Image (cartoon, coloured by chain):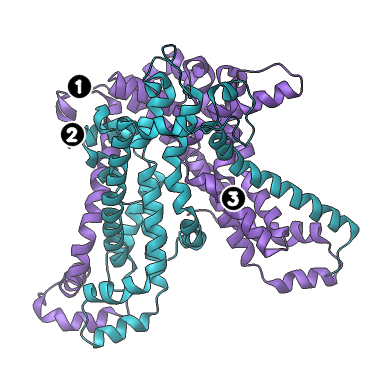
């Protein structure tokens, strides 16, 4: 295809724009990284731009020695693991009958589920329901009230429906039950989509915030995002030292930067694996009959 | 759906009463189906339980909008007050402030946030080098996976008085601005940060639509002398249109639901007058202060507006294309 001069100019500007915009996706994180490794004086006198100035690891040492932060980290790791496993179990067990050709209640149940996507219950009745169930200050409140992500469940269901029907039939002839077909045939064939959805769930649990705001009042049980938020709004607690008594190579600016990254690093680490799958996964989310 | 009923039904029909009339037939069918595929019914039970307990019970619990709900009396014991709560919120100044903030921000999101991924998808589509495309895309998708606490933290740090944006302003000889404390910037920051976080992610579904376009269409257009711009306007955009429409309708249905996480993490008491939205207000007045009935009324009002908008736009959509239903 021959490109006109106008096309070429457009191409050039398109590349320039896209690369510049893509750089802004990463630069805020790099800037924080630079600040977190800079001296407090450099950080507060606006000298830091993408590279650390007067390099020091003092902020990171201080943050990594923060027992409260590690405790919240542990809670988040716990709900991420337990939550993801349970969510996958619930989602697969719900998706399979809804993808099964012989399941008679498929349509009404699917309709009932889609209705909940359009009519969201208001926050207060939701809050009162979970509280009535005795889940205040319980980590279950961070898992059970959202254990099935409808979008994620539909991704699995759509994938199941795309598996060839002949598999079903031949397995049945071999004497396989419905459960056998799910566990011995469907699940092994669905590994990529299961990996995608697990990662979606895991990221969701890692980033759990609003449910913790609603249900976890006890700071001892705060997940990481809550703790991060608390430190960002009152950073002097993060410093936990009197900055005027003693010579510290960090201040609230550098500590906040390090804490934000502390909560983000796990996401950035799984991101390469995540992005291998999610594009396909996200596209499977469209509803099919 | 009727074909398969024959053989399965005959297998189990000896167990179901023969005298069943016309009306009982579906019931027999379900019983037979349950007997044969009982494990499917068992499997879906936890899922149904989840949707009933955490979706339908709270939905039904919205009736406290018509009550003077007292927590120790429960729904059964609380007094019914009809539309009193609705009358109350409409006579309440704070409600109008919060509603206005929500509607204005929602409108900005729709005007700027909604088209952004469409435009970006079109720009991605013009990139011919696969390597460059993949690299750029993977950077654009990253912020979607960060929490709003993190993104809020980043925004506050970059826009603070010592932040990099003010460093740039100083370098250009401009006065520093306390962006997060000033009311006039709040809504722009909300819209821009939402675009930053989700514009890349939003392109995925549009790129899928573009990928489904038959290449022959472009070839034919080139034969007719159409340049890239004309191809975009006459082929790419029209093919994307149904996807755009569906996403638009889904968006409209949640028009006033801006997302608690984002606003809560960007809001400070100094920006309440322009940034306090329904969800943050309901959280403070409802969850923290215990005004359950009034805040449920506000939440219900929000849902009703969303549904009305969805209904109106769906009707309009059906005149030209297909709607959601």
Q: Secondary structure at mark 2?
A: helix
Q: Colour of chain B?
A: purple
Residue B139 shows which numbered tag?
3
Please tell me which residue lies in front, B315 or A104. Answer: A104
Q: In the rendering, at what x and y percent does residue B233 appear?
A: 75, 56
Q: Which badge, 1 or 3, comes first in the chain's sequence?
A: 1
Q: Residue at x 26, y 72 (%)?
A: A183
Is residue A38 visible to the viewer in this orientation of the structure?
yes
- Kindly report the distance in space between the C-alpha atoms of the residues bearing marks 1 and 3: 50 Å
Q: Secondary structure at mark 1?
A: loop
Give the side of residue B313 with respect to residue B91, left or right. right
| Mark 2 belongs to chain | A
Q: In the rendering, at what x and y percent does residue B123 appear?
A: 71, 53
Q: Quadrant location of residue A2?
A: bottom right
Instruction: Supply the letter of whichever chain is cyan.
Output: A
Q: Residues within 10 Å of mark 2 (few under 14, many from 20)?
A: few
Q: Residue at x 73, y 70 (%)?
A: B217
């Amino acid at each position: 295809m021959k490109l006109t001069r106008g096309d070429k100019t457009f191409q050039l500007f398109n590349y320039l724009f896209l690369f510049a915009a893509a750089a802004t996706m990463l630069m805020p994180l790099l800037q924080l990284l630079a600040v977190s490794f800079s001296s407090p004086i450099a950080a507060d006198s606006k000298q830091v731009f993408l590279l650390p100035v007067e390099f020091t690891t003092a902020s990171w040492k201080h943050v990594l020695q923060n027992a409260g932060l590690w405790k919240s980290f542990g809670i988040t790791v716990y709900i991420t693991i337990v939550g993801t496993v349970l969510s996958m179990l619930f989602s697969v067990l719900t998706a399979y009958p809804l993808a099964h050709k012989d399941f008679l209640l498929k349509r009404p149940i699917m309709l009932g589920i889609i209705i909940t996507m359009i009519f969201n219950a208001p926050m207060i009745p939701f809050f009162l329901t979970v509280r009535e169930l005795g889940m205040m200050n319980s980590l279950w409140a961070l898992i059970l009230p959202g254990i099935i992500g409808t979008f994620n469940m539909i991704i699995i269901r759509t994938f199941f429906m795309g598996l060839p029907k002949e598999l079903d039939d031949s397995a049945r002839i071999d004497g396989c039950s419905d459960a056998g077909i799910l566990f011995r045939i469907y699940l092994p064939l669905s590994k990529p989509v299961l990996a995608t959805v697990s990662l979606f769930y895991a990221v969701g649990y890692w980033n759990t915030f609003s449910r913790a705001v609603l249900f976890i009042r006890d700071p001892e049980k705060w997940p990481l995002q809550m703790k991060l938020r608390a430190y960002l709004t009152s950073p002097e607690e993060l410093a936990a030292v009197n900055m005027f008594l003693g010579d510290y190579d960090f201040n609230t600016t550098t500590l906040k930067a390090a804490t934000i990254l502390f909560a983000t690093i796990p996401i950035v680490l799984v991101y390469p694996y995540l992005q291998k799958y999610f594009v396909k996964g996200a596209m499977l989310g469209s509803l099919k009959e | 759906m009727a074909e398969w009923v024959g053989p399965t039904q005959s297998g189990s029909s000896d167990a179901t009463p023969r005298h069943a009339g016309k009306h009982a037939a579906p019931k027999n069918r379900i019983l037979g189906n349950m007997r044969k595929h009982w494990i499917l019914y068992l499997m879906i039970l936890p899922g149904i339980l989840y949707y009933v307990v955490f979706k339908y019970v709270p939905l039904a619990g919205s009736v406290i909008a018509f009550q003077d709900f007292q927590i120790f009396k429960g729904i059964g014991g609380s007094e019914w007050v009809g539309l009193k709560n609705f009358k109350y919120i409409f006579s309440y100044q704070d409600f109008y402030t919060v509603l206005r903030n929500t509607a204005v921000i929602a409108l900005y999101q729709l005007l700027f946030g909604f088209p952004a991924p469409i435009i970006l998808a079109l720009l991605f589509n013009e990139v011919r080098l696969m390597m460059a495309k993949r690299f750029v895309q993977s950077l654009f998708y990253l912020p979607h996976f960060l929490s709003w606490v993190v993104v809020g933290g980043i925004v506050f740090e970059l826009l603070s008085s010592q932040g990099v944006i003010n460093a740039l302003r100083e370098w250009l000889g401009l006065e520093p601005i306390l962006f997060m404390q000033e009311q006039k910037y709040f809504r722009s920051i909300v819209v821009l940060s939402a675009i930053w976080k989700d514009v890349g992610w939003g392109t995925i579904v549009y790129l899928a639509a573009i990928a489904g376009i038959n290449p022959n269409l472009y070839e034919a257009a080139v034969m007719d002398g159409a340049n890239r711009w004309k191809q975009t306007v006459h082929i790419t955009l029209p093919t994307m249109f149904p996807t755009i429409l569906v996403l638009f309708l889904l968006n409209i249905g949640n028009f006033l639901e801006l997302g608690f996480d984002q606003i809560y993490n960007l809001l400070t008491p100094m920006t309440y007058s322009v940034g306090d939205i329904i969800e943050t207000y309901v959280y403070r007045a409802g969850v923290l202060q215990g005004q359950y009935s009034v805040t449920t009324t506000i939440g219900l009002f929000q849902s009703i507006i969303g549904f009305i908008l969805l209904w109106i736009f769906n009707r309009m959509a059906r005149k030209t294309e297909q709607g959601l239903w």
